[in-house]
């Protein structure tokens, strides 16, 4: 009988590790290829991981609560009657990579011992541990004092969470009220008063908080506003929605129309559809529009419509409805949340008219669409100007001023408004 190592598969853009939440199978269980055998959590989504091979789950290498690295072994599967699929060349490459990393770490330690101030670290911390430390206001100096139970003394998720628990009970080290090596001040201590309710943030809320702070630190946020007359869209939807719902058994909302206008404008202004990598600008080929969806617990998640510019309005409607349903039922996959190049947030669904949305990194812009409101407006007629009641809405476009100047940011949102205002009342779907 042959054995094969199952590695943690790619989990989406920029995700390098995942925390094992639960093994759905135990050692000795028979498993089928593509059968879900464990559940993991990344900084974007919780998802199940299918088996890469069928056979017997011989050994679990990463325990529940521990962090697994993408591309590294997490289990050993015994294949009944199969041949070993382990590629010797791949093993050699992996060993060489580990040797290079070890060498680089050794060089870093030597260099740090010579020129690095004592406030900096020579220990390895996983991105998950770093995120937790940042969210809890734990400085690098304080992190250095935590005893690690992982390999080579590495601080695991369990270690830092245990430290935080003891710290909150008064048994941990206190964080000095000074800026850390990044120049950022730790959170101001807050004391709950009698009658206050203390609500612990869930994991998703903590991640959202961290990502929003990171985005504000990374991008120079600027917001431009445009008001659009969307009367044609409102009248068209009112005319079409009942027949559409009977035919397709799903709702016709404004969101697909907004996504369509955004996708068209991104084709017109491709330098909005970019990312920043150091001193380089990555101009994206695909137009993948993320749509923010509010969950019942108050959190927000952003599934992505891939190649939105290539879909018809009917296709966009199907995609928007499907992703929104999956989001609310916690059924989104890592792929549903990856590779977005631009984001749309419909704040009008909450009754808001204007907003200053925060950019989803590594994108450089985001559009918030406000509530549609009836307003008296001046319109041009063959017999002259007149006052009429029109349906109008504000578009709030936040963009990264490092790479998007005011002219480009303003022209883009104006073009989105133009596409909305020119919507054809006789269009079919």
Image (cartoon, grey):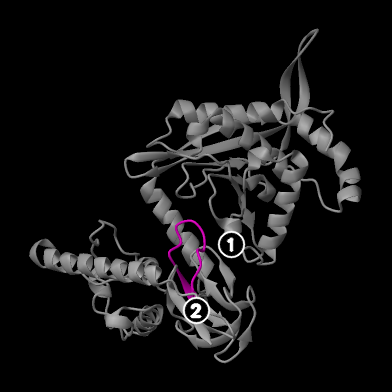
Q: If you read the primary sequence from the N terminus, does the residue marked by circle 1 or circle 2 appear first?
A: 2
Front position among marks 1 and 2: 2
Mark 1 vs 2: CB contact within 8 A: no
| Residue 202 shows up from this direction | no
Q: Position of residue 54 (x, y in %)?
A: 61, 79
Residue appearing at x 87%, y 45% in the figure: 244
Residue appearing at x 58%, y 45% in the figure: 288
Quarter of image, res 240: top right
> Mark 1 falls on what kind of element?
loop
Q: Position of residue 81 (x, y in %)?
A: 59, 85
Residue 18 within the magenta-colored segment of the rendering: yes
Along the line of sight, the residue nearer the viewer: 147 or 17:
17
Q: Position of residue 241 (x, y in %)?
A: 85, 43
Residue 67 within the magenta-colored segment of the rendering: no
Circle 2 is placed at which residue position? 84
Q: Is residue 399 above or below residue 25?
A: above
The part of the chain drawn in magenta is 6-19
Q: Is residue 367 left or right of residue 240?
A: left
Residue appearing at x 59%, y 31% in the figure: 265
Q: Is residue 179 above or below residue 353?
A: below
Q: Is residue 54 above or below residue 271?
A: below
Q: Position of residue 263 (x, y in %)?
A: 62, 37
- Count of marks, rendered view: 2
Circle 1 is placed at which residue position? 299
Mark 1 to mark 2 CA distance (whole Å): 45 Å
């Amino acid at each position: 009988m042959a054995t094969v190592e199952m590695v943690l598969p790619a989990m989406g853009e920029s995700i390098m590790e995942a925390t094992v939440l639960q093994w759905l199978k135990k050692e000795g269980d028979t498993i089928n290829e593509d059968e879900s055998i464990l559940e993991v959590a990344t900084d974007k989504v919780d998802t199940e991981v299918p088996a890469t091979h069928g056979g017997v789950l011989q050994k679990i290498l990463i325990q529940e609560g521990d962090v697994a690295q993408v591309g590294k072994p997490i289990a050993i599967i015994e294949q009944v009657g199969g041949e070993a699929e382990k590629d010797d060349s791949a093993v050699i490459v992996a060993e060489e990579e580990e040797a290079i990393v070890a060498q680089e770490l050794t060089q870093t330690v030597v260099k740090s011992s010579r020129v690095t101030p004592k406030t900096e670290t020579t220990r390895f911390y996983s991105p998950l541990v770093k995120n937790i430390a940042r969210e809890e206001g734990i400085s690098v100096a304080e992190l250095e004092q935590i005893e690690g139970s992982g390999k080579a003394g590495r601080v695991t998720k369990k270690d830092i969470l245990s430290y935080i628990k003891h710290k909150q009970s008064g048994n941990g080290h206190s964080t000095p009220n000074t800026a850390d090596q990044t120049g950022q001040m730790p959170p101001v201590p807050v004391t709950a008063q009698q009658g206050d309710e203390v609500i612990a943030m869930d994991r998703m809320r903590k991640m959202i908080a961290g990502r929003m702070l990171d985005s504000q630190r990374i991008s120079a946020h600027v917001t431009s506003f445009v008001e659009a007359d969307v009367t044609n869209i409102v009248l068209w939807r009112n005319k079409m929605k009942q027949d559409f719902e009977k035919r397709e058994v799903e709702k016709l909302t404004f969101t697909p129309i907004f996504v369509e206008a955004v996708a068209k404008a991104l084709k017109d202004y491709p330098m909005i559809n970019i990312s920043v990598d150091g001193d380089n600008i990555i101009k994206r080929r695909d137009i993948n529009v993320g749509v923010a969806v509010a969950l019942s617990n108050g959190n927000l998640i952003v599934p992505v419509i891939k190649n939105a510019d290539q879909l018809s309005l009917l296709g966009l409607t199907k995609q928007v409805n499907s992703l929104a349903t999956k989001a609310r039922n916690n059924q989104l996959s890592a792929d549903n949340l990856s590779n977005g190049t631009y984001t749309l947030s419909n704040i009008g669904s909450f009754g808001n008219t204007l907003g200053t949305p925060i950019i989803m990194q590594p994108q450089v812009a985001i559009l918030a669409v406000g509530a549609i409101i009836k307003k008296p407006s001046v319109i041009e007629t063959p017999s002259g100007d007149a006052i009429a009641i029109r349906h109008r809405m504000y578009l709030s476009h936040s963009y990264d001023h490092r790479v998007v100047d005011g002219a480009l940011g303003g022209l883009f949102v104006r073009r989105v408004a133009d596409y909305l205002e020119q919507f054809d009342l006789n269009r079919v779907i």
